Image: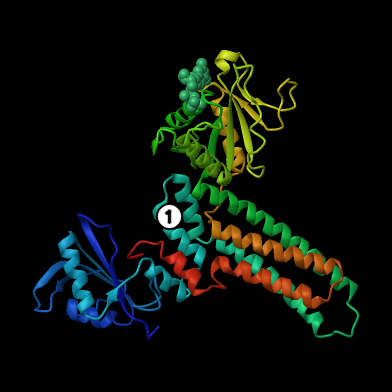
Amino acid sequence: MSGRETIAAVATPPGVGAVGIVRVSGPAVPDIALHLLGRLPAPRQALLADFRADDAEPIDQGLALYFPAPHSFTGEHVLELQGHGGPVVLDRLLARVLALGARAARPGEFSERAFLEGKLDLTRAEAIADLIASGTEQQARLAVRSLRGAFADRVERLLEALTRLRVLVEATLDFPDEDLDPNLAAGVAADLDQLLADLDRLLATAKRGERLRDGLLVVIAGAPNAGKSSLLNALSESDRAIVTPVPGTTRDLLHADVQIDGLPLRVVDTAGLRLSPDPIEQEGVRRAREQIDQADLLLWVVDDADPDAAVAPPADLPAQVPRLVVRNKIDLSGRAPGDFPPTQPDRRATAAAAIACSATTGAGLDDLRAALLRHAGLGADAGGELSARRRHLDALARTREHLSAAARAHSQASPPELVAEDLRLAQDSLGEITGAVSSDDLLGRIFSEFCIGK
Ligand code: GDP
């Protein structure tokens, strides 16, 4: 760390507040403290001091805290200056620290240094950013769990098991002429099975965590007048969410951010999926289809009181997007609210699950909410356990592919070199999650999303 520059930033949000904090990290900290405060504060003890300009005139008076390396957040020498929270005074204080030899920190640079100094793994660093950005209590709870290592610990345990297995397989490479001990081969197969099962459990947990963090993209589609907008309003109002209609053109898409038991939903109301010669409407249809392609769930809304309504979504919608049929207006059709299993005899039965409800009376809307939670893997008994990101899911999915390839190679009695290579690839993918394996590019992407001073 000795070759590193010393960095500084205002760590409190811009604007006026009771307290404002300037954070400094790096080898020049003791020297900066001497010039700024007249002395180095005792480690980890608050010192009330004048923060002096170069002519010794005080810029402010406040508390100084010194955390000598390696016992600090970044692992470097850290100085925290708690002054008064006004923009001018903080600007002057930061300028003084920069003049004394620090440079302005980039967003997330303190956390990046903490990672590089081995103070934090990547899941913990990301959890800090997630905690700060939490929009729901549930998101904050999960972020704290990841921050305390809930995610990293599970990844570490898998990595250890993977390492043991690699050692076992690679040991057989050293004795190519001997026949493979059948007990050993069976042991490898059992270990691979166990690893795959553990990985699948972590993947399921991480998927729930990712959904609670990023939410679900739910697209509402259906014939005009089926009640799509009413449903969107009913879902958002009852949860007292902020509805933010963003109509670009009259036939553009409407978005609303809705929360159900802490699960954020981005609900998009499409402009009615019918073919039209009107170029503006065609543009609306094109955008609707684009949203549907990316959706986590398609809600196909049907006017249950209209005997001619198409109950099945159009066949040309992307097959990979799961769908839920919503039979709306049951106050008119007289159907009972709630789950409407496709097994139930019905002349217009469809393969998709259906919920019967009324946007007007609210009947069946709780069933709809429960169905949305179930769809996110958040049914009544499945709580989220940790916060996770798309990046983690990608890495876990790649790990799974390599492990499956190893299991296949092993079961086909392929040369152990191939099994060993697949295991190495699996270990690398898994290691990306905590940063045991990382690239500058990956780190740049992760930390650039942080705020300044964190
Ligand atoms: P969209 O074109 O699919 O967005 O449909 P709207 O939400 O604009 O609703 C079309 C019409 O149906 C409006 O007059 C609504 O008041 C009415 N509507 C929507 N949902 C219900 C419902 O559950 N029951 C009844 N009786 N009317 C409904």
The residue depicted at 54 percent of the width and 51 percent of the height is 210
The residue depicted at 55 percent of the width and 67 percent of the height is 434
Left or right: residue 161 versus residue 259 is: right
The residue depicted at 50 percent of the width and 35 percent of the height is 270
Residue 139: where, in percent of width, then height?
A: 47, 49
Q: Nearer the viewer, residue 438 or 146?
A: 438
Q: Is residue 263 above or below residue 357?
A: below
Q: Nearer the viewer, residue 311 or 373?
A: 311
Write down the quadrant of residue 296 in the picture: top right
Q: Quadrant of the C terminus?
A: bottom left
Residue 268, visible in the rendered structure: no
How many tags in the picture?
A: 1
Query: Badge 1, how many Cα within 10 Å: few under 14, some, many 20+?
Result: many
Residue 317, visible in the rendered structure: yes
Residue 234: where, in percent of width, then height?
A: 47, 27
Q: For the residue marked with disc 1, what is the amino acid?
A: Leu
Q: Nearer the viewer, residue 287 or 241?
A: 287
Left or right: residue 346 versus residue 372 is: right
Respond yes or no on whether mark 1 lies under 8 Å from ligand 1.
Answer: no
Left or right: residue 37 versus residue 371 is: left
Q: Quadrant of the N terminus?
A: bottom left
Q: Is residue 450 above or below residue 289?
A: below
Residue 170: where, in percent of width, then height?
A: 76, 79
Q: Which residue is mark 1?
A: 131
Q: Coloured how?
A: rainbow
Q: Nearer the viewer, residue 105 or 86?
A: 105
Q: Is residue 393 above or below residue 74?
A: above
Residue 168: where, in percent of width, then height?
A: 77, 76
Task: Say what secondary structure mark 1 lies in.
Answer: helix
The residue depicted at 55 percent of the width and 28 percent of the height is 366
